[in-house]
Amino acid sequence: MSRRICCICLALSVLIATVSIAYADAVPAAPLTEQDYREAVLALEEQGLQTGFASGLTSTQRLYENDLPAGGEDASITQLQFLALDEMEAEQLAQQAAREQLASNLALLSQYDGVKLSGSATVYSDAGVTATSGKIESGKVAKLKDIDATGRWFLVAFANMTGYISADLCTPVSYKDYDGTDAVRTRAQILARSNAAAAKTFGTGVVPGGSTLRSAVVDYAMAFMGVRYVYGGASRSGTDCSGLTMQVYGYYGISLPHSCVAQYRMCQFVSRSALQPGDMVFFSRLGHVGIYIGGGQFIHAANGGVQISSLSSGHWSNCYYGAGRIISG
């Protein structure tokens, strides 16, 4: 019961008491019965009022069961009772607000299954307490999984992330309206899709979008690192130098014979200063061949297996014969 109502009730009580006293002087007193009190209490309750005795009893019980109300350290017993009643009223209002918020959350979840972001959002593992490294960009659409009790944080799923983001950045939407569009994809996913669409096939090899045949040849050659040297071999179980180049270029549809001399004759001559990754380098009067990988290095099959060596090292620099270009451009 608020203080205003209490004051009104008190004024009415004083007025009624004054009239009753005046009337009692002229009318013989009639003893009150328990039934009279019950009827009076019922009449008050029908009007939404509670007796002062019942209110005082409730607040007194609260004082015994709990700590003093806030600001009640220097208050009298009567003031403490009013403070306790104020706290009870505040709790009831908070409980009602929580019930209304829950109803609002359930209504929103029943109507929408996605949210569109109006700004970049940090993803939290809980409701706004522990931030993760994840972020969702502005304009993206995430799946709406749940809403925290306060309604201020939405539990969402986006790409490989699941966590809470601020409701202030979210506009509820129907997820199916955006499913399959770039709004539900990360930048990395969009780039990967673009690269896949731009990929080109050479022989049995595939060159990803954004890459080149030259870099693809080098990458594939690196996959042979450590394969043992076998004279006359041309497989992953064992290979010689021309067998390695034959396998690598052959994977991308460039057919080469199993011979250093024959391979050199198929190439366009290129100076050492103009070498590009994917060009072929020859040594020892066409007795050895490798694939230039950039940075002054080449990959080749020699004693010890497939390995990387430097063109400027003493042995390979001394026996360098020339270079040839088998990939145009």
Image: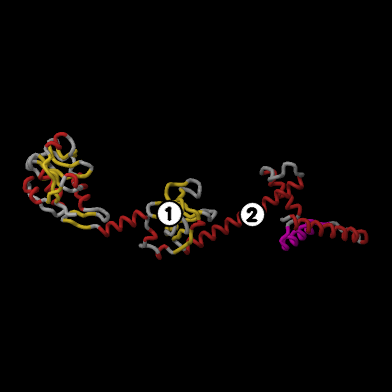
Residue 184 is inside the magenta segment: no
**Residue closest to the eye, 6 or 134:** 134
Image height of 126 relative to 141, above or below: above
Determine if residue 154 is in view: yes
Q: Which residues are drawn in magenta?
A: 32-49
* Quadrant of residue 177 within the rendered picture: bottom left
**Residue closest to the eye, 84 or 16:** 84
Mark number displayed over residue 243:
none
Give the quadrant of the C terminus: bottom left
Determine if residue 309 is in view: no
Farthest residue toward the top? Answer: 314
Measure the alpha-carbon separation of dots 2 and 1.
Answer: 38 Å
| Residue for badge 2 | 92
Q: Secondary structure of the magenta portion, mostly?
A: helix
Color scheme of the displayed model: secondary structure
Q: Are marks 2 and 1 in contact (CB under 8 Å)?
A: no
Viewed as shown, does residue 129 lie left or right of 86? left
**Residue closest to the eye, 219 or 111:** 219
Q: Residue 121: x percent and y percent?
A: 46, 53
| Amino acid bearing label 1 | Ile
Q: Residue 82: x percent and y percent?
A: 73, 50
